[in-house]
């Protein structure tokens, strides 16, 4: 009996503590913003629990196959723009395409990037993702114009073709090929070559290993003591910075070249400091090892599930290949980008895949939004692209992969922003499309395949749970395009017998 009373008293004390903490957190967030506007001008929503806010619910939704349900629930209750408290900050979430566009267009007096602590520690203070104002615009401009140059596109095309052929040349028909691993290796090699002119070899492998260790800590606990994830990632970054230093030194000693052959030389020619160059070279490897390979992998996943789209893409690519074989000309970068259906497949993959779910900013002053709302100074704002890309008022059957929806639509509007917008619009967007187009061309024209069951994971980054395993079969010379043929896996009977009923059904599913 006495024990029960103690429990009740403890429960009351605990609840009172939570209540006081909640009121304190709520008041302190309001006070710290020094926002003179009334609470009514904040969007609707709730700040959730003390300290953790709504982070737990956000993360538990993020791990499901429909991470947008966290947003959808609040969108229905409070409208397209609402307040929340996630990742330790009071946050305004925008799932409204026009509000998000206005936020992205804000300059650094209004908004600055806001990332989790572990990410800012690892990126370093010179990273383009974190710097603001003149330096950000300058580096963005320099990188952007180099990445858009026809010379670089021609080099990327040659490198990508070479690395793709090397990789595909080693694919056996009697073993599983993991598309995500293959594309990560190729994407990394291509981008590192464009960044610092390093060719595949021991140094590249060393860099890749350290980079994988580095990237694993981007969303970790911000505790830097031996044994922690962040500590291991920082050690890996140190090794990469050392290698970068060696490469930059060699470039300096080699004398400056008028026509820079890589991004590091572009920045060196502008007398950028060594730490700015090396921090940014390392950060720029992220789309090489992650965003672009994941985009290729998702495109193959969606095509595997949509035979009609695959058939049309195959016909388009086979036609170009036949033409090039006939004339004896080599494929150049503009050939790859000239395939309209292939481009709509990439666009639709970007919309449905949402490789970057959204971006976060911090308000530098009170900012007035459409509808009379205000983002108080010091609050974070999360422009959540995924909800816009999957909005049924903007896209019919939004969860369906439908590349045919694109020819009649404009990709430059604010309802399609996979590459962000405003001053920080991704400078690598053309390059990403080019790399995907090259991979898809060589993949579909050389192989038929059957995909094993796999699913998309959305948090902390988008990827395939099992790395997208597939069985491949090389197309024979008489395997004319448009001709459907059943895959014949005689010779890989070990795998046949081992498959359970479900994968056997999947196995039987005919892929063009
Ligand atoms: C599927 C591929 C890619 C996707 C989905 C993607 C997406 C994005 C997004 C959404 C942003 C805006 C971030 C923000 O506003 O805070 C961004 C920025 C950026 N991206 Fe990409 N990206 C991709 C590929 C690439 C490639 C291939 C490169 C370079 C080789 C690249 C380089 C950059 C850089 C340097 C920025 C920072 C721009 C700045 O803050 O000024 N990206 N990207």
Image: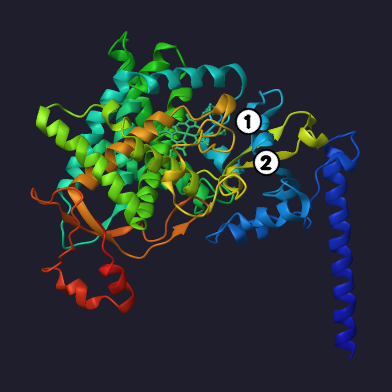
Q: Which residue is mark 2?
A: 96
Q: Residues within 10 Å of mark 2 (few under 14, many from 20)?
A: many
> Is residue 98 at least partly visible in the picture?
yes
Residue at position x 88%, y 47% in the image = 27
Q: Nearer the viewer, residue 261 or 370?
A: 370
The quadrant of the picture occupied by the N terminus is bottom right
Q: Nearer the viewer, residue 484 or 332?
A: 484
Cβ of mark 1 under 8 Å from ligand 1: the answer is: yes
Tell me: 13 left or right of 476: right
Q: Nearer the viewer, mark 1 or mark 2?
A: 2
SS label for mark 1: helix
What separation in Å lies between label 1 and label 2 (alpha carbons)? 12 Å
The figure's colour scheme reads rainbow
Q: Residues within 10 Å of mark 1 (few under 14, many from 20)?
A: many
Q: Which mark is residue 152?
A: none
Where is residue 508 shown, x and y percent of the image? 26, 69
Q: Which mark is residue 104?
A: 1
Specify the quadrant of the image occupied by residue 317. top left
Specify the quadrant of the image occupied by residue 346. top left
């Amino acid at each position: 009996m006495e024990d029960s009373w103690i429990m009740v008293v403890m429960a009351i004390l605990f609840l009172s503590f939570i209540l006081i903490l909640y009121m304190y957190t709520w008041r302190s967030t309001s006070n710290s913003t020094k926002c003179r506007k009334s609470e009514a001008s904040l969007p609707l929503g709730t700040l959730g629990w003390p300290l953790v806010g709504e982070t737990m619910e956000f993360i538990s939704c993020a791990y499901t196959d429909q991470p947008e349900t966290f947003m959808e629930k609040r969108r229905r209750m409070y409208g397209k723009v609402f307040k929340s408290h996630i990742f330790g900050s009071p946050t305004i979430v925008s799932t409204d395409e026009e509000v998000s566009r206005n936020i992205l267009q804000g300059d650094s007096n209004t908004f600055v990037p806001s990332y989790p602590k572990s990410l800012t520690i690892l990126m370093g203070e010179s990273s383009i993702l974190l710097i603001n104002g003149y330096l950000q615009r300058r580096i963005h401009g320099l990188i952007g114009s180099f990445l858009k140059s026809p010379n670089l596109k021609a080099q990327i095309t040659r490198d990508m073709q070479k690395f793709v052929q090397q990789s595909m040349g080693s694919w056996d028909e009697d073993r599983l090929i993991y598309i995500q691993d293959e594309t990560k290796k190729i994407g990394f090699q291509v981008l590192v070559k464009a960044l610092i002119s390093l060719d595949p070899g021991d140094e590249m492998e060393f860099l890749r290993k350290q980079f994988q260790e580095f990237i694993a800590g981007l969303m970790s606990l911000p505790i830097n003591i031996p044994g922690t994830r962040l500590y291991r990632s920082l050690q890996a970054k140190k090794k990469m910075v050392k290698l970068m230093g060696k490469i930059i030194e060699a470039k300096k000693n080699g004398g400056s070249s008028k026509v820079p052959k890589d991004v590091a030389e572009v920045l060196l020619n502008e007398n950028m400091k060594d730490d700015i160059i090396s921090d940014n070279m390392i950060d720029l490897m992220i789309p090489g090892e992650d965003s672009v390979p994941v985009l290729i992998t998702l495109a193959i996943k969606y095509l595997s599930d949509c035979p009609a789209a695959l058939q049309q893409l195959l016909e388009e690519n086979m036609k170009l290949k036949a033409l090039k074989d006939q004339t004896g000309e080599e494929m150049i970068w503009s050939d790859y980008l000239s395939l309209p259906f292939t481009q709509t497949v990439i666009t639709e993959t970007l919309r449905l895949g949402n490789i970057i779910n959204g971006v976060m900013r911090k308000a530098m002053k009170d900012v007035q939004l459409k509808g009379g709302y205000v983002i108080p100074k010091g609050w974070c704002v999360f422009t959540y692209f995924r909800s816009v890309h999957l909005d049924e008022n903007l896209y019919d059957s939004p969860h369906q992969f439908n590349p045919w929806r694109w020819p009649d639509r404009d990709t430059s509007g604010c309802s399609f922003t996979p590459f962000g917008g405003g001053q920080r619009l991704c400078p690598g967007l053309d390059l990403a499309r080019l790399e995907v187009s090259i991979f898809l061309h060589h993949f579909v024209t050389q192989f038929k395949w059957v995909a094993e069951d796999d699913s998309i994971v959305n948090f902390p980054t988008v990827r395939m749970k099992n790395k997208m395993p597939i069985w491949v079969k090389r197309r024979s010379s008489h395997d004319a395009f448009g001709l459907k043929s059943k895959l014949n896996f005689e010779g890989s009977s070990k795998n046949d017998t081992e498959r359970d009923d479900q994968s056997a059904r999947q196995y039987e599913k005919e892929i063009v």
